[in-house]
Image: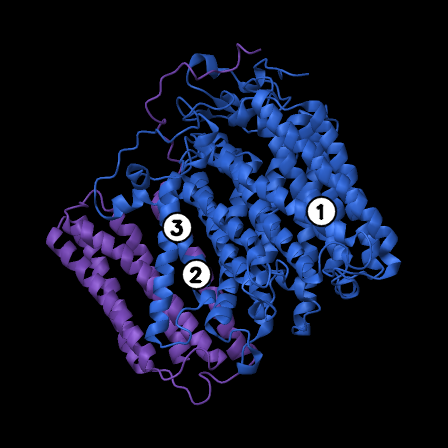
Amino acid sequence: MEAASVSHLEHDHHGPPEANKSSRVDPAMLGMLLFIISEIMVFGAFFTAYFFIRVVNTDSWPALGQEIPWAIAGINTLILISSSLTLHWALHSVKSGNRFAFKVGMLSTFLLGACFLFIQVNEYIHLGYSPTESAQGSIFYGLTGLHGAHVFIGLTLLLMVTVRAFRGHFSAEHHRGVEVPGIYWHFVDVMWVVVYATIYIL
Amino acid sequence: MAAKLRAPGWYRAGAFTLLGIAFCFGLTTLIRALYSYDPLIDGYAITVVAMLGAPFFFLVGLGTFDYWFYWAAGRPTRAEDHSSHGAKSWRDYFKVNTDHKVIGIQYVCTSFFFMLVGGAMAMLIRAELAAPGAQFVNAQTYNGLFSVHASLLIFLFIIPVFAGLANYVLPLMIGAPDMAFPRLNALSFWMLPVAGTLMLLSFFAPGGSFATGWTAYAPLSTDAPLGQMMFTIGVQFAGASSIATALNFLVTIITMRAPGMSFWRMPLLVWANFSTSLLVVIATPFVAASQFFVLLDWALGFNFFNAARGGDVLMYQHVFWFYSHPAVYIMMLPGFGIVSEILSVKARKPIFGYRMMAFSLLAIVVLGFSVWAHHMFVSGMQAWIRVPMMITTAIIAIPTGIKIFSWLATLWRGVLKLDTPMLFALGFLTMFTLGGISGVMLAMIPVTIYVSDTYFIVAHIHYVLFGGSLFTIFAGVYYWFPKMTGRMYDERLGKIHFWLTFVGFNLTFGPMHVVGLQGMPRRVADYAEQFAGWNLFISMASFVLGASTLVFVWNMVASWRAGPKASSNPWRALTLEWQVSSPPPIFNFDAVPTVVGGPYEYGVPGAVHGIFNSPVEAKPAGSLVTRPTKE
């Protein structure tokens, strides 16, 4: 009967009820991790293209007459890895309440990342060949460019964190806004190591 | 006016879209000037850049990013006053809204709009094919019609409509006040109209709409006219939308279940969406990447698929099908969930083999990634891949079979209530089994080689996606219609709709098996004289099928406007969404309920699923004496 059906309309709400926390995992962190899985798959698809050139078709890598500057990129790799270390330091500092170290850590992470991107663009300019000349070139630019785009996204996130850090946000108790973009930055770094190892070294 | 342009909404969205087009025009021209390209102003380049850029300006203008911009800049965010929750008039459905119930209805209505457009294209296709030779459209337009038909129905109907239904009922089912990321939820909805608009606009592009099928194989697509880019870019938006929603579902299911709602007490619809979301998160990036390759090849002269410069054409098919085979399950698993709900409720019996049902979903997720190359048996790929792919494809029939037999066992000796949702669920059971059987046939390499690119394939895909997915969608829409709108649909019209659809569907797609085996090729506007009889028959049947949709639309519109009021639990179901009023209160629950038992304990004396805190609601749901207001 109608009377038995539950009517909530007469109740006056001021907000939604508190959701039950059915997992210890932080929702924002879980969301970021799932997004990173998606990102890994995007890279996976680009690596498939690479795989087809090198393993399935056993073409030369790089294309004949082209060179890949592994030494400069190696220095760039070190820059990116060190940015991960400074980021970890920044997170550690905010957790222990050291605001100065937190701000320095965030700023140096951002600058190291920007430095990486600058060197990468510089590398493109001096490479001497374009993606239109060979499939190898397409894949080289495709993979490094895809990674560069991720560095750009990561830098944007880091910039937000840095701005908020200098505005006095975050504390020893509330630092999720540092952790979640941070894990993305670490992913970008790890991905670079994979890209560097396959594209430049192997 | 100035205030309207500052506040989030359609005025600002329009202004921002124009701004975005202007920005893309400037950006493209600037880059071309820097590289001293000739001509400086290139319409094609600007259009492609604008198709990528302007949608973001549109979304910003509409207000989907407002909160995040405030947050990111470290400015105080506007306090959530919940004014954007709920919808008081139809206008509220055209605004950015963070309420999962409003977004669910937005999703369902938008995707049904694209379903009607795509269906109208199917009518044109059948009109053209009613007789041999050219009737109404030329071959190029015909190719465009079937391509847009498939793309709309796959990317803008089946995938999002399931997301929409789940958006509405899933948080209610698990006892959550909303999705985990409501603003992301709103953004993922608003990317859909963008994708659909792009695909539809392609008809106005120079050179006509994209005409390479929904598969857009390279190098056909990398040499196609501008319209192809509208598919390529549209898919990016649809894909981003679907990844964002899937991520949202996963986080919601993992972190926001009501107390006592363990994974083994979740309704199977929740399980189904959990599995689907895993597939989406892992597989969808591949279709995005495949279309990025096409975009780069088409627009910037990359050589991913240019064989003359070392590119590999087959790589496209591998990457594409590595998404698009799992996509078949993305389009089917939520339907499995819907059918599990309906069969159990309407047969008044616990679902048979609940845990095996959940495990078989997960098995399909895992196996779904190991079968992609069965779409490529005649592509000229390495021959050794064929047999392993044939075997894994055949293995997928096992978890699917577990589900089919579990549903049959659920029905066994049940007290079946044959109303519209149940009829569609039973229709799904038979039609999907037929589609599954032709699927197993197609998994066999010799059969595929024989019938590849014939109407047998068309018949199979429609038995799976129409007889399978669409029947479950209809079942789900009828089943949750009282909950979503607070009104009952017209049962008589619903039954007429079912029988017209069921008969029209079989008369349309059944004979396609025959003409396919006789060798009629698909994706061709003309055909040999010998197929004329069957094709005329198929075309007439398809018009019946098309007309049946009108009955559905009429039923939905009229019932939503003036149907009899629905009680909170017209089906006497146990799951949590039926224990709140119809439509549910604005925040779903006064207090989050406690779950103490399984969701399908129908006919089990004393069984309780959820307990509500206030005394009125603490009664076991199954014992409430509620009846449908109609019948």
**Label 1: which secondary element:** helix
What's the residue type where badge 2 is placed?
A: Ile
- Among the 4 quarters of the image, the one containing residue B417: top right
Q: Which residue is mark 3?
A: B17
Which residue is at 88% across, 52% downward? B533
**Label 2: which secondary element:** helix
Circle 2 residues within 10 Å: few <14, some 14–19, many ≥20: some
Which residue is at 41% across, 44% downward? B187
Question: x and y percent of residue B511 in the render?
Answer: 82, 49
Residue B97 horizontal side relative to residue B370, left or right: left
Circle 1 residues within 10 Å: few <14, some 14–19, many ≥20: some
- Label 3: chain? B
Q: Are marks 3 and 2 in contact (CB under 8 Å)?
A: no
Specify whether disc 3 shares its chain with disc 2: no
Q: Which residue is mark 1?
A: B123
- Real-space Cα separation, disc 3 to disc 1, in angstroms: 33 Å
Question: x and y percent of residue A101 in the render?
Answer: 13, 56
Q: Which residue is mark 2?
A: A40
Which residue is at 57% across, 23% downward? B561
Question: x and y percent of residue A160 in the render?
Answer: 24, 52
Circle 3 residues within 10 Å: few <14, some 14–19, many ≥20: many
What's the residue type where badge 3 is placed?
A: Thr
